[in-house]
Image: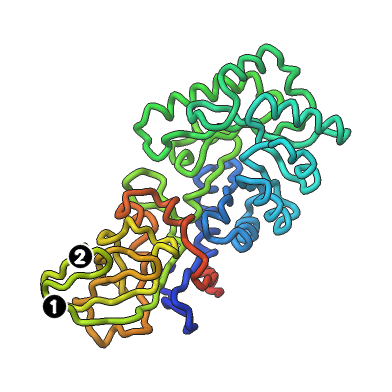
Amino acid sequence: MLDTLPAINGSGAASELLIDLGAIKQNYTDLKERLGGVECGAAVKADAYGTGMDRVGPALFEAGCRTFFVATVDEGIALRGLLPDARVAVLNGLLQGTEEVFPEYGLIPVINDLGQITRIRQMCVTAGRALPAMLHIDTGMSRLGLTAGDMKRVSEEPDILDGPDWLYALSHLVSADDPADPSNAAQLKRFREALPHLQQRMQASLANSAGIFLGPDYHFNLARPGFALYGGRVKDGEPSPLAPVVRLSARVLQIRDVKAGDTVGYGGTHKVRKDGRIATVAVGYADGYLRALSSQGAAYLGKLRLPVVGRVSMDMLAVDVSDVDPADLHPGGFVDLLGPHYTVNDAADAAGTIGYEILTGLGHRYTRRYIDAVSGES
């Protein structure tokens, strides 16, 4: 999809982040089909993983998604303003001082401990009705959710759950992107062991993006994909089976001849081996292009790979354009730093991190343009 699009729209922007809403909708549809009849939700936390919740939320709703997950109350309030008819769940839970916010904005708290259970029950009494909630069970992450001890108490005192309208019991997989990791089966076993105490009250949700690809045993009643919707990989070390969503095109500020022995960038960490040409590009770590990509990352001009050389600085980086015909690139032109030939997953591998960090770290100095390459809209 992105491979057929122009790199820039002719504006004077230093760089452009192009986001393909059609690809996001297609990825959602593909994941939904893989789930069979199981409901497919969507995680749109962190501003839809850096792609813009204000545009992505409505696009996913248009694609059929009705249950959305955010991290914070503020994100939930913002999404509610965009999607008045969606179910919006807040993963960070029911924190003290937020009790009035959830019913006011129709948000669903994901309950993470026994104290929050007490809090949601009191809220139901105050409201005079059963408020919706979800119950998070920790099966191995040791982060949020009811512990094994908490679940023992729930099994011994089932009335502790009286009051709320419990929608789902959920848990989060630790290593779903590694299908061979035994923790997947161990978490599935713990989750199943917890459900008999809960299934008369609520349905179940375990699979994140990668969990969907572990197979039907992990699907239960609702899946919660996030990273995969935005083109992220679902299996460690392998290309994503889903469509790329973002394309980052950056403007060339200057092209200069360099001689063998010249150095490039701060610290002189790159030494030119033979005479050539270097292009200075208007993107740096202040734009979310990680400093770890110094002499590791790559830009592309069409299908031609241009290695990043020297240190990435705050506002600029350098690429070796010695192999580019001078007629094909000049100051004011653009190269792709992310796109169909170099995805967020590729950049993450080069930086020694994960695609989540690349995607969510994209800055706000870019001119953002939204298109739908599937329908041809822009």
Q: Report the front residue among 92 and 229.
A: 92
Amino acid bearing label 1:
Lys
Q: Give the quarter of the image for residue 200.
A: top right
Secondary structure found at label 2: strand
192 w.r.t. 248: above or below: above
Residue at image coords 30%, 55%: 350
Q: Quadrant of the N terminus?
A: bottom left
Return the x and y of residue 17 as percentages of the image width and height: 47, 69
189 w.r.t. 370: above or below: above
Q: Is residue 76 left or right of residue 145?
A: right
Q: Earlier in the sequence, mark 1 or mark 2?
A: 1
Q: Which residue is mark 1?
A: 259
Q: Mark yes or no: residue 364 visible.
A: yes
Residue at image coords 44%, 77%: 14
Residue at image coords 48%, 27%: 140
Secondary structure found at label 1: loop
Return the x and y of residue 290 as percentages of the image width and height: 37, 58
Amino acid bearing label 2:
His
Label 2: how many residues lie within 10 Å, few (<14), some (14-19) or many (20+)?
some
Return the x and y of residue 35 as percentages of the image width and height: 53, 42
Q: Which residue is mark 2?
A: 270
